[in-house]
Structure formats: structure tokens, C-alpha cells
């Protein structure tokens, strides 16, 4: 009998990829507060708002998942400063609802973020002290602590700068750069925020490996090389033959965003490579794979 996985946030960038990655080996129940009106890999996404205790209880009790992957989040970093309740309700209380309503035997995968760090001296390994500088980061760290303090076996994964292969995912940095440059629009991109961005299909494969092997603990995940958002945009333009001169350098201060961003971030993937034999890929490799996928369509 296949083990049962309930996925939250299934309409999101990562959630959709998890459905296609895990569908053949597990019985899936994809859920989201705003389900897509289409099936993903042949599966419908059902409505479940993780902040709605009664709805969560009904669905979790009925499906009785062996595994819960919590990919749902209030991901609007600036919005989290303005509507703190909304951010905390989803990112912390949503997880608490999943914990309270699930069996004590359930195994959780909690998707966290590099925003639990201040971004002063990344890349970070798993032992680095956390110190979030945005409210979004604070809620994600509080969720990690809730997860660790629960009586549930759990895995906390911290990726950074997620991007999918789809230009329809408006939250994806890749999609924004590709679309703007394809439309011959100039873009301002920061030169002083460093990360090692995460191509979602490879991250979904990593989650598959972890779930199949009941991996517990905290692991960081990211690509092989650390680069600024500006250099990431340049690589996108180079791989896709787009006009590099449309990419204008800007500093984080000039952007005047509501929330502070970690500047020198990045997730050191050494532990996950060494302990779990997970392969890490360069950004150029991932972008070239996206190009191949697009050309096949
Ligand atoms: N994006 C990044 O660069 C990044 C980097 C590091 C870590 N992460 C983490 O990775 C995970 C996946 O991120 P993502 O990029 O896939 O985000 P995403 O595309 O914004 O997906 C999150 C999904 O959660 C849904 N959601 C929001 N509130 C909900 C609720 N109350 N109940 C159920 N579902 C709800 C969202 O629906 P709506 O869109 O309708 O609100 C959305 O479909 C998140 O935990 C995020 O914190 C993301």
C-alpha cells in the first residue's frame, strides 16, 4: 500500500512541482486555500485553508496522512510587515493546526527559508545562529520552533530564492526576468543581495529522496554557486539569448522596500550533499535545463 502524503500550498510554485514529483510513489492529497481550477499531473487540488482549524481537522482526519508536506506560506515579504496577523496566521498557526489535527505518527516536512538569517555573513550552514530581520522571517523561524517542539517526526528544509521552469509563476525571479526581457522592458536588479538560488524541480527531487528515506533534522539546500540577483539576471539573459543591456544595476537601499532583505545570504548545501548524497547543480545547468524544457513545448 502506498504511503499517503497531504501537501499544503499545492497551487504554489513548489507545491505544483511536488505533485508531479511524488505522484508515482505515494497516494497524494494536494490542497491549497485557492485551489487551481485545473488538475496537476491528473490530480485535482482540493480546498483547505490551513488557518481554518475545522476545515483542516475534517480533511486531515478523513485522509489520515502518513506524511504532511507543509509548502503553504504567506510569502509576501513586504506584505508581512503590513499585515502581521495574516502572515503569522498562515506561517505559524497554520502549521499548529496541521500538528494538532494529525496523528502523532505523522511525519512532517516543513519548508523554511534563508530569511531566518540576517544575511550579514552567509552562506549559512545548519549550525549558524538564526536572526531574522523581517517579520516574514520571524514567522518562518517561529514555525521551525513549533515544528521542533511538536511530538511529530520532522524534517525542516531551508532553500533560498525558489524558481520554477514556468513563466506563469509570477512569484518566480526567473519568470519575471525572462518575461520582462522578452518584452524588451528594462529591469532594475540589485547587485548587493547574494544567494545560491534553488531550481524547484531539483529541490522537489530532494524532498522525494528525504521522504522516501524518512530523513529528519534540518538541512540547507541551494545551487552550487553563489551569485547576486544582478548576476543571476545576467545568466538568465545569456542562456536565453536576451538583451543584457536591459538589466540595470541597483542597490537594495535604492529599492526602498518595506521589509529588510538578507544581503549576504545563501544556503551551504554541504551537509545534505555529504549525509544524504544529494546532488547539487550549477545555476547555468538549471537554466539550460529550463531552456530545453521550453524548446520541447
Ligand atoms: N519563493 C521563494 O523564493 C522561497 C524561498 C525560500 C523558501 N520558500 C518557502 O517555500 C515554500 C513554498 O514557496 P513558493 O515559492 O512555492 O510559494 P507560493 O508560490 O507563494 O506558494 C505558497 C502557496 O501557499 C498558499 N497559501 C497561502 N495561504 C494559505 C493558507 N492559509 N492555506 C493554504 N494555502 C495557503 C498560497 O496561495 P495564495 O497564493 O492564493 O495565497 C500559495 O498557493 C514556502 O514555505 C516558502 O516560505 C520560498
Image: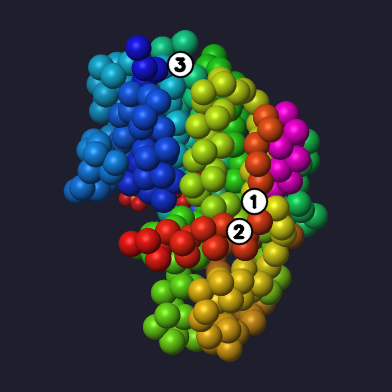
Label annotation for residue 194? none
Instruction: Check disc 1 and report the residue beneath it.
Output: 281
Q: Quadrant of residue 247?
A: bottom right
Sequence order check: which comes first, mark 1 or mark 3? 3
Front position in the image: 250 or 163: 163
**Could you tell me how far apart the alpha carbons at marks 1 and 3 are, in whole angstroms?**
31 Å
Q: Residues within 10 Å of mark 3 (few under 14, many from 20)?
A: some
Identify the residue under disc 3: 106
- Nearest the camera: 65 or 139? 65
**How many C-alpha atoms fall within 10 Å of the one at disc 2: few (<14), some, or many (≥20)?**
some
User: Can residue 183 be seen here?
Assistant: yes
**Residue at image point 54% right, 45% down:** 202
Q: What number is the disc on residue 285?
A: 2
What segment is highlighted magenta in the picture? Answer: 267-275
Q: Earlier in the sequence, mark 2 or mark 3?
A: 3
Which secondary structure lies at badge 2?
helix
Q: Position of residue 267 (x, y in %)?
A: 69, 48
In x, y percent, where is residue 256?
58, 74
Amino acid at each position: 500500500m502506498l504511503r499517503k502524503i497531504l501537501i499544503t500550498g499545492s497551487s504554489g510554485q513548489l507545491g505544483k512541482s511536488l505533485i508531479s514529483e511524488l505522484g508515482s510513489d505515494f497516494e497524494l492529497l494536494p490542497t491549497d486555500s485557492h485551489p487551481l481550477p485545473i488538475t496537476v499531473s491528473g490530480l485535482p487540488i482540493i480546498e483547505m485553508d490551513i488557518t481554518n482549524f475545522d476545515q483542516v481537522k475534517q480533511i486531515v482526519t478523513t485522509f489520515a496522512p502518513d506524511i504532511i508536506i507543509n509548502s503553504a506560506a504567506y510569502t509576501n515579504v513586504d506584505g508581512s510587515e503590513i499585515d502581521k496577523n495574516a502572515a503569522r496566521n498562515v506561517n505559524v498557526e497554520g502549521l499548529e493546526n496541521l500538528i494538532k489535527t494529525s496523528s502523532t505518527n505523522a511525519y512532517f516536512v516543513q519548508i523554511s527559508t534563508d530569511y531566518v538569517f540576517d544575511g550579514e555573513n552567509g552562506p549559512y550552514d545548519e549550525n549558524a545562529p538564526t536572526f531574522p530581520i523581517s517579520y516574514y522571517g520571524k514567522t518562518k523561524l517561529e514555525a521551525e520552533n513549533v515544528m521542533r517542539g511538536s511530538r511529530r517526526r520532522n524534517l525542516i528544509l531551508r532553500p533560498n530564492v525558489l524558481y520554477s521552469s514556468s513563466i506563469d509563476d509570477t512569484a518566480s525571479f526567473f519568470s519575471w526576468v525572462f518575461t520582462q526581457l522578452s518584452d524588451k522592458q528594462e529591469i532594475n536588479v540589485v547587485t548587493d543581495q547574494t544567494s545560491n538560488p534553488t531550481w524547484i524541480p531539483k529541490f522537489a527531487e530532494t524532498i522525494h529522496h528525504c521522504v522516501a528515506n524518512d530523513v529528519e533534522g534540518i538541512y540547507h539546500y541551494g545551487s552550487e554557486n553563489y551569485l547576486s540577483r544582478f548576476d543571476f539576471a545576467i545568466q538568465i539573459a545569456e542562456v536565453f539569448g536576451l538583451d543584457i543591456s536591459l538589466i540595470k544595476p541597483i542597490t537594495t537601499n535604492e529599492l526602498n522596500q518595506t521589509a529588510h532583505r538578507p544581503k549576504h545570504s545563501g544556503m551551504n548545501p554541504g551537509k545534505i550533499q555529504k549525509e544524504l548524497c544529494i546532488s547539487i547543480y550549477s545555476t547555468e545547468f538549471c537554466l539550460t535545463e529550463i531552456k530545453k524544457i521550453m524548446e520541447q513545448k
